Image: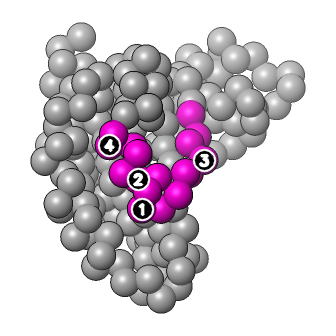
Amino acid sequence: MLVARYRHRLPADYPMDRIRTRIAERAPGWAAIPGLVFKAVAIEERARGTAANAYSSFYLWRTAGAAADFLAGPAFQAVIESFGRPQVETWLPFDVSLGGAATAVALSEETRPVGPDEDLLRQRGIERARGRDLATQPGVLATLVGLDPAAWRLTRFTLLADPIDARSGAEVAHLAAPGLDALRSV
């Protein structure tokens, strides 16, 4: 699997309804992307308390090859044509834990550096146990922690069925999850 995200910062006066319209128009096609476990389209709005307006796509891919096919394909080309080529962040999944929620309306994120002396195998076990615990909480669709070995940081993303404070995360405007049921059965 591979975790990926790209984010577009938007001007303070950007009409965010344009983003919501774009999401609604394109959402049906996301269910047919090969190798996609899920895609959460997130919005951050200054009017709701975030530091800036932004639009991002957060993905869990079945394989790195599926992610590469998407980035080389026409759907991502449409993103480039509309917003420019974004930096795509990627993480190696340390843990993916699925909860009982049916959908998500919020995405929280917490990042911490990995110290040079940390035992990664031990840390992975700790993160897996934490993921299992978080996944049992009401309102959690999924929680996953990814390792960014380029920057040596761990980031935990949690998809939540209930809204959260804008300073704690982003609104999920749409969730496409064509591969989630298959992952649940593994």
Q: Residue furthest right?
A: 116
Local SS, label 4 = helix
Question: Are the two marked residues, 4 and 2, in contact with CB atoms closer than 8 angstroms?
Answer: yes
For residue 82, which numbered disc appears in the image?
1
Label 3 vs 1, first from the N-terminus:
1
Whether 81 is among the magenta residues is yes
- The residue indicated by pointer 2 is 79
Residue 51, by quadrant, is bottom right
Q: Amino acid at mark 1?
A: Ser
In screen coordinates, is 79 left or right of 145? left
Q: Position of residue 137 (x, y in %)?
A: 30, 42
Q: Nearer the viewer, residue 155 or 19?
A: 19
Q: Position of residue 93 (x, y in %)?
A: 50, 24
Distance between the alpha carbons at the discs numbered 3 and 1: 15 Å
Label 4 vs 1, first from the N-terminus:
4
In screen coordinates, is 94 left or right of 81? right
Distance between the alpha carbons at the discs numbered 4 and 3: 16 Å
Distance between the alpha carbons at the discs numbered 4 and 1: 11 Å
Q: Nearer the viewer, mark 3 or mark 2?
A: 2
For residue 87, which numbered disc appears in the image?
3
For residue 50, which numbered disc appears in the image?
none
Q: Amino acid at mark 3?
A: Gln
Q: Position of residue 146 (x, y in %)?
A: 55, 31
Question: Are the two marked residues, 4 and 3, in contact with CB atoms closer than 8 angstroms?
Answer: no
Residue 18 sits above or below residue 179 on the image: below
- Give the quarter of the figure containing the C terminus: top left
Q: Which residue is at a point 32% across and 70% down the rendered structure image?
A: 19
Distance between the alpha carbons at the discs numbered 4 and 2: 7 Å
Residue 143 can be seen in this image: no
Whether 132 is among the magenta residues is no
